[in-house]
Amino acid sequence: MPWEKPEMVEVTVQGAHGWSTLEGPSTSLSHQNELSVLEAESHQHRMAIQDSITSGKGTEVAYAHHVKNYEDWWLRDQNQ
């Protein structure tokens, strides 16, 4: 039986320097589940790092205010 080239898939991931698109062979469902768990743990770890960087700086209230202003602006802009 001749060797068959595996189906290739593209995966977009976020790394330390932004988003990257990687190409590789398709994986089994169990590998995809493992990857999903790893991705969730990685995201949780990244959020913890972000929290440790920003906590105690006194910017929480100001940041929340800026986010709310941006969301209000976005809604007004989209309704025009």
Image: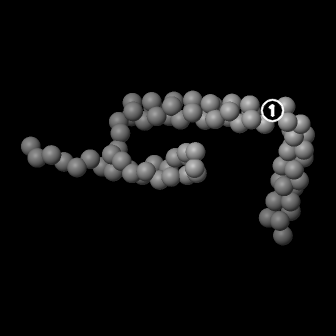
Q: Position of residue 68 (x, y in %)?
A: 87, 49
- Relative to 37, is 27 on the left or the right? left
Q: Position of residue 50 (x, y in %)?
A: 71, 36
Question: Which residue is depicted at the point 86% across and 59% down?
Answer: 73
* In the image: residue 46, left or right of residue 63: left
Write down the residue under mark 1. Answer: 55
Specify whether 7 is left or right of 3: right
The foreground one among 18 and 8 is: 18
Measuring 35% from the left and 36% from the top, which residue is drawn there?
Answer: 28
Q: Residue at x 22, y 49 (%)?
A: 5
Residue placed most toward the observer, 66 or 2: 66
Give the residue furthest to the bottom.
80
Residue at 57% across, 29% down: 41
**Vertical placement of residue 62 versus 33, above or below:** below
Mark 1 belongs to which amino acid? Ser
Q: How many marks?
A: 1
Residue 22: image location, x then y, percent: 43, 51
Which color mode does the image show? one colour
The C terminus - image quarter: bottom right
Q: Is residue 71 above or below residue 26?
A: below
What is the x, y in percent for residue 71?
83, 53
How crowded pointer 1 is (Cα within 10 Å; few <14, some 14-19, many 20+) is rated as few
Q: In terms of depth relative to the viewer, which is nearer, 37 or 54?
A: 54
User: Does residue 1 sit above or below 23 in this rendering?
Assistant: above
- Which secondary structure, mark 1? loop
Instruction: Tell me the quadrant of the picture where the N terminus can be found.
Output: top left
